Image (spheres, grey):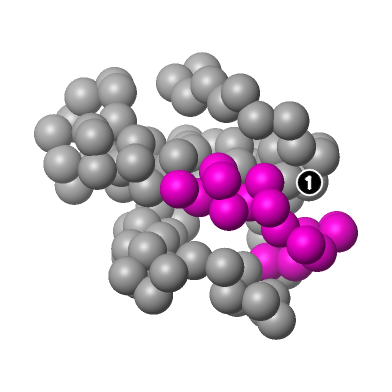
Amino acid sequence: MLFTYNIPVEKDIKTELETLGKMIGVYCRGRHDGRAELCRECRDLLTYAAGRLEKCPHHPKPSCRGCPTHCYAPENRARIKEIMRYAGPRMLLRHPLLSLKHYLKK
């Protein structure tokens, strides 16, 4: 696994974070330099997202699209949307089980 998290979170948040980490990984490899590790910009975004997910007041956590509380700053929300648009279709082939869990959660 490319990503390690040292954050104590509930199972649904942990799955959400794993899915987001994989999506950022797909995006970073496809759009940045193609290495196995995340670039600094993508790593910082993942760290930011992990901190926000850790503090999510909703249990069980809804999808961000349908959440009544927008916890990301507008520029980071735009970056996450861009990543999801790029990585979403590619996740079906690379991580089908995570994609299915994410789709069923909606």
Q: Is residue 62 magenta?
A: yes
Is the residue 39 above or below the residue 4 in the image? below
Residue at the extreme top: 1
Which residue appears farthest toward the left when viewing the image? Answer: 33
Total residue callouts: 1
Place of residue 47 in the rendered image (x, y in percent of width and height, measured from the top left): 45, 40
User: Quarter of the image containing the C terminus?
Assistant: bottom right
- Would residue 13 be visible to someone looking at this image? yes
Residue 81's x, y, as percent?
Answer: 40, 68
Work out whether 79 lies above or below 49: below
Task: In the rendered view, tell whether residue 8 sits above or below residue 57.
Answer: above
Residue 26 seen from this side: no
Q: Residue at x 61, y 23 (%)?
A: 6
Q: Which residues are magenta?
A: 48-63
Judged left or right of residue 44, residue 97 is right
Residue at the image point whose x is 45% and y is 48% from the top? 48
Location of mark 1 (residue): 12
Residue 64 horizontal/vertical position (percent)? 62, 69
Residue 9: x and y, percent?
75, 37
